[in-house]
Image: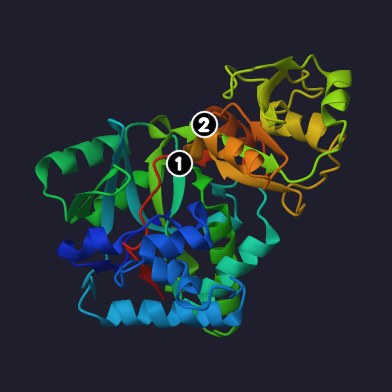
């Protein structure tokens, strides 16, 4: 069964919640974070993107960045903006985006469950990102941001949440600048809600693979310095919002390639029927769209050679049929010639990056489905990195777990 543990959250006072809350660290770059946090000293971006408070040429991996994050978190928690709950609690977190509602349980999950595959992952992490988040966790002695998990709900969790929301007032209820509405309820009978997860055998990582892996590494590091370690310590748990599978919404996770061969389209045409003036968004699974030389080209990927779940993914077929044989990209996690563009930015972002010369090729994919994600996880397989982009995104800075 899955462990969902109540915790003593640090949280902003209701009147400061909207100003403190921010987008997750990994959906924006440093420049965007600096712009968003300008003239906003209460913004949690100062904690999860602390490089914005250092000179502009500072590397995000500079030791000064981790120390700045520690100082910024301590300053916020010691200010009159935040307070810590007196008792352990669970929370219900609802997001509404474009009229679509998504509701989950906000609590702590177990590093042991992650290590023992009660919490299943579906993607490999990028070493540089994993190292970075591990250093932030250890330096701050906190899990500043929650991960997003999903599960197959027989009905008990959803029924509990619906009943509780109907009968109780929220502690936070605001609309962020991107139009997404965030509402959070504090659950008084937390043990009752925790017990509902006794019937849930498996959790799935949806968004936050690097934070999960980093929480595991940080816990191992903390345990190595604690001769009395017994797995009950707070560092052995990390915050997550757990959503029923049928509420999840996945968008495409697109790609850009910085350098391509001069005869790229010719090589592509030798293997595929390439159609010019294609739609920027592929109409169905198995099709991709490519932006190069001021035009969109469409093609249908070849059928997979294997029947296992991971081999049938469009992102896997893209790797096997185009990225490696034509573009010599063997590992998307580490190759500097490829980067990733979240689906929320749309295909206009791909066009912009190619048109202004930052990239040579934009690749637009059909979204991976939640069923594909779970099938891959259940089979013990892994997707290529950055295969799924979930919307809406959780806000950071609302409920913080320290150890």
Mark 2 Cα-neighbour bin, 10 Å: few <14, some 14–19, many ≥20: some
Residue ID for mark 1: 150
Residue 37 at what x, y percent from top left? 37, 65
Quadrant of residue 372 within the rendered picture: top right
Residue situated in front as seen by the camera: 66 or 308: 66
Residue situated in front as seen by the camera: 186 or 271: 271
Tell me the SS state at disc 2.
helix
Q: Give me the C-alpha separation between circle 1 and circle 2.
A: 9 Å
Quadrant of residue 240 within the rendered picture: bottom left
Is label 1 in contact with label 2 (beta carbons under 8 Å)? Answer: yes
- Residue at image x 77%, y 35%? 319
- Residue at image x 29%, y 64%? 20
In the depicted structure, whether residue 205 falls above or below residue 246: below
Q: Is residue 156 visible?
A: yes
Horizontal placement of 43 versus 323: left or right?
Answer: left
Residue 118 at what x, y percent from top left? 54, 49
In the depicted structure, whether residue 403 falls above or below residue 247: below
- Residue at image x 54%, y 84%? 226
- Give the number of the disc on residue 370: 2
Is tag 1's residue or tag 2's residue first in the polypeptide sequence?
1
Horizontal placement of 273 versus 37: left or right?
Answer: right
Residue situated in front as seen by the camera: 35 or 152: 35
In the depicted structure, whether residue 292 falls above or below residue 187: above
Q: Is residue 229 visible?
A: no
Residue 362 at what x, y percent from top left? 67, 36
Residue situated in front as seen by the camera: 101 or 215: 101
Tell me the SS state at disc 1.
strand
Mark 1 Cα-neighbour bin, 10 Å: few <14, some 14–19, many ≥20: many
The number of numbered discs placed on residues in the rendered structure image is: 2
- Where is the C terminus found, in terms of image quarters? bottom left
Figure colour scheme: rainbow
């Amino acid at each position: 069964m899955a462990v969902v543990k109540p915790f003593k959250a640090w949280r902003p006072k209701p009147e400061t919640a909207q100003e403190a809350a921010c987008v997750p660290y990994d959906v924006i770059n440093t420049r965007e974070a600096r712009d968003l946090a300008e003239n906003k000293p209460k913004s949690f971006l100062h904690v999860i993107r602390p490089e914005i408070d250092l000179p502009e040429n500072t590397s995000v991996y500079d030791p000064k960045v981790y120390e700045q994050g520690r100082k910024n978190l301590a300053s916020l928690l010691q200010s009159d903006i935040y307070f810590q709950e007196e008792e352990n609690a669970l929370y219900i977190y609802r997001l509404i985006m474009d009229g679509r509602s998504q509701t989950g349980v906000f609590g702590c999950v177990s590093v042991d469950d992650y290590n023992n595959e009660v919490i299943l992952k579906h993607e490999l992490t990028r070493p540089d990102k994993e190292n970075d988040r591990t250093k932030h966790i250890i330096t701050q002695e906190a899990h500043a941001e929650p991960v997003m998990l999903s599960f197959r709900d027989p009905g008990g969790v959803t029924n509990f949440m619906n009943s509780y929301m109907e009968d109780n007032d929220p502690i936070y209820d605001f609309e962020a600048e991107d139009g997404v509405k965030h509402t959070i309820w504090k659950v008084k009978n937390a043990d009752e809600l925790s017990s509902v997860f006794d019937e849930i055998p498996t959790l799935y990582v949806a968004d936050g693979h690097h934070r999960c892996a980093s929480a595991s590494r940080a816990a191992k590091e903390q345990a190595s310095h604690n001769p009395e370690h017994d797995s009950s310590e707070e560092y052995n748990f990390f915050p997550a919002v757990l959503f029923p599978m049928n509420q999840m919404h996945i968008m495409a996770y697109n790609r850009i390639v910085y350098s391509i061969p001069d005869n790229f389209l010719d090589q592509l045409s030798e293997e595929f029927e390439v159609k010019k003036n294609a739609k920027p968004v592929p109409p169905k699974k198995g099709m991709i769209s490519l932006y190069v030389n001021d035009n969109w080209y469409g093609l249908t990927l070849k059928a997979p050679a294997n029947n296992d779940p991971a081999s049938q993914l469009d992102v896997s077929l893209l790797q096997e049929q185009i990225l490696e044989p034509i573009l010599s990209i063997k590992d998307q996690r580490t190759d500097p010639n490829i980067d990733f563009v979240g689906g929320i930015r749309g295909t206009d972002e791909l066009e912009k990056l190619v048109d202004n010369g930052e990239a040579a090729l934009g690749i637009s994919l059909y979204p991976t489905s939640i069923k594909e994600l779970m099938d891959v996880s259940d089979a013990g397989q892994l997707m290529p990195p950055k295969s799924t982009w979930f919307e809406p995104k959780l806000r950071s800075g609302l409920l913080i777990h320290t150890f």
